[in-house]
Image (cartoon, rainbow, N blue to C red):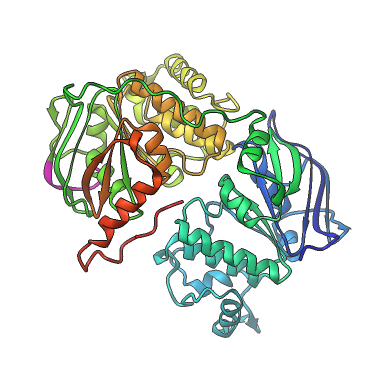
Amino acid sequence: MATAQPVIELTGITKRFGGTVALDDVHLAVHAGSVHALVGENGAGKSTLGKIASGIYTPDTGRIAVDGQPVGRWDTVRAQRRGIVMIAQELSLVPDLTVAQNVFLGIEQSTFGLLRRDHGRRFAALDEMAGFGLDPEARVGDLRIADQQKVEILRALAREAKVIVMDEPTSSLTAHETRRLHEVIRLLTTQGRAVVYVSHFLDSVLEVSDTVTVMRDGRRIRTAPAADQTKSSLVEAMLGRELAVSFPALPPAPHPGTEPLLKVEALASDRGVKRASFEVRPGEIVGLLGLVGSGRTEIARALIGADRVTAGRVTLAGRALGRTTPRHSRDAGLVLVPEDRHGQGLVLQRSVTENMTLASLGRFSRLGVIDRRAVSRQVDELVRRLELRPARPELPVQSFSGGNQQKALIAKWLVGDPKLVILDEPTRGVDVGAKLAIYELIADLAARGIGVLLISSEHEEVLGLAHRAHLVSRGEVLDEVDPRHLAVEDVLRRLFDVADTAPAGDAGKAKEPSP
């Protein structure tokens, strides 16, 4: 039950990064025993506000009060002492340590300077309270993302957190894992703790939160009970306009008799692709529909040579690729925009310009000297085309919101004028507005005659954007389907039917669709 006095209150908060105003005179009051959601487009300031509440950032102006008492200096150490912690979107665990070691890292108990080994008892008490059932001796690097998030929550509980800021906690979770996380959040509130829930999944926000604050361009637009909101009302407040059309108009599908741009025949790899056969024509968007673990990403990696191909044939623009590498694939005109933009796509400390051109420097150099004017012209064109905000490519990529980082990642692979682009989860972790921009870009690529292979766990995206689609299960490309005559429910039913007929060795693999 929410309390009358806020457990933490931020008043008049302003934060600038260089010339960019990330927060402008923002007020936030969070009450114990409640879930307070922050929603808005990427770049709206919601994550920045959460980081100020948890002491990661210091506000330029404004006041912070905890339990009604103003605080002076504010940083992560002081915030944790007052019970305010943050679980970031990119988890900060040590993979090679055990679950228990991660939970108590930095707050180990000692006697005469020697570490005590009673963390088993302390861990058991914490885990019983949360009901997670985690193995304290399991190596964190071997855990699934959902269980790693549970470790982060236990870390917060071990530090006696009374306010837990969760930044995009469901972005890498399946629907079942999301439901389990929501159950944990409700348990935390029954214990009198508060949760600040930062998310772009509006259905999840409406399901789990008590209060919703909508932000736009660094300002608080409104705070209201979640029960009074709908998905449409939140989107309208986030964007400042009604969202009339979810997907852009697609260019006409190529004639079925058109010579394929990409032809894949009985492809197999050492990472679980068993038999993949399909075609993509010039200017065509072809989707891969599958449950988590179905092998969609593995097919993409095999196509560009990131994983070893063990059988099959890949032909691009009439030319057999053979045993290729990612570099050779790029030179041939076949590129992959990976799903993990931080781990596989971007160098966060470097500028947007450097990231966009990193994979294509040969296009801008002669005798080892880079033509910086040519670089600037190319980058400026992509910044305009992708509506990067702020339009300052000289800034480091880590200073941009998740949606704008994703735009920079996509731009990186458009610099070389590819013939075919594989997009693996192109809108993961981005808000509604950024999604629209990426959808329009995908349609524009097809209109330019570029082939697109689209992989997304949000099946609505594939159905709304693809000319054709294929079902994928256990590393095999199965039936072709017409997205225009298929509902999401039909897709899931067919995918589950396929999964249920799996041999015994595959029967337990990932029967839960991603959200």
Question: Which residue is painted at 25% across and 45% down in the image?
Answer: 299
Q: Is residue 85 magenta?
A: no
Q: Position of residue 377 (x, y in %)?
A: 46, 15
Q: Which residues are magenta?
A: 305-312
Q: As drawn, which residue projects farthest toward the right?
A: 69
Q: Report which quarter residue 272 is drawn in.
A: bottom left
Q: Is residue 307 left or right of residue 46?
A: left
Give 217 or 251, whichever is nearer the viewer. Answer: 251
Give 355 or 44, whichever is nearer the viewer. Answer: 44
Question: Which residue is painted at 39% across and 32% down in the image?
Answer: 465
Q: Position of residue 9 (x, y in %)?
A: 81, 53
Q: As drawn, which residue projects farthest toward the front?
A: 485
Give 436 or 58, whichever is nearer the viewer. Answer: 436
The quadrant in which the N terminus is found is bottom right
Q: Is residue 311 magenta?
A: yes
Q: Report which quarter residue 83 is drawn in.
A: bottom right
Q: Position of residue 142 (x, y in %)?
A: 39, 66
Q: Is residue 73 left or right of residue 276?
A: right
Q: Report which quarter residue 344 is drawn in.
A: top left
* Residue 396 seen in the figure: no
> Above or below — where is 436 with respect to 343?
above
Give 234 or 40, whichever is nearer the viewer. Answer: 234
Question: Which residue is painted at 47% across and 56% down in the image?
Answer: 173
Q: Position of residue 249 (x, y in %)?
A: 42, 23
Q: Is residue 69 left or right of residue 169?
A: right
